[in-house]
Image (cartoon, rainbow, N blue to C red):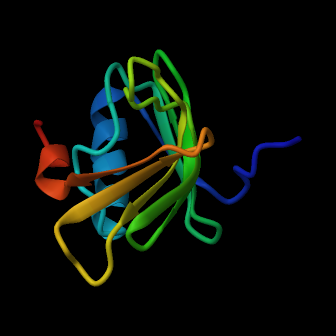
Amino acid sequence: MAVPKQGGIIKKGHEEGIKFAVSILEEHGLPLGLLPLADVVEVGFVKTTGYVWIVQAKKITGYVEKKRIKKLEGVKAKELMLWPLVNDITVEDPPTGKIQFKSLAGITKIFPMEAFAAGQ
């Protein structure tokens, strides 16, 4: 299956990639420290579909929309000594200061948003 990158804006390099990734999160009402960003090679975003990709040592992809990332791939969350893949992240709306993570394994976890502030 082809990756839906057509019409996307692409930023290459660590500094430009991080700036772009943070701007996407900010624009969609998501915490700026939400995604692990290290040694970024490329960040791309298709505004019409919300599809985002981040290429680093490990690739991260998903679809962003207001206060949510869905169909997320490439991010794990530690739960019960296991690392299930996280596939949906939602900032509660109306705002409660909480963010919810869901995995394909059926695990749901809620955290305070400040835990994912930039630099945390």
- Write down the quadrant of residue 29 in the picture: bottom left
Residue 120 lies, in percent from the top left, at: 11, 36
Residue 9 lies, in percent from the top left, at: 54, 54
Which residue is at a point 30% across and 38% down the rendered structure image? 18
Looking at the image, which residue sits at the far front? 80
Q: Is residue 17 above or below residue 24?
A: above
- Write down the quadrant of residue 2 in the picture: top right
Which residue is at a point 10% across and 37% down the rendered structure image? 119
Looking at the image, which residue sits at the far right? 1
Q: Is residue 101 above or below residue 38?
A: below
Residue 48 lies, in percent from the top left, at: 63, 71
Which residue is at a point 22% across and 78% down the rendered structure image? 95
Q: Is residue 1 above or below residue 113?
A: above
Residue 76 lies, in percent from the top left, at: 46, 29
Res. 33 in view: yes
Which residue is at a point 29% across and 59% down the rendered structure image? 99
Res. 52 in view: no
Q: Is residue 113 left or right of residue 49?
A: left
Looking at the image, which residue sits at the far bottom? 94
Q: Is residue 21 left or right of residue 60?
A: left
Observer-nearest of 98 and 45: 98
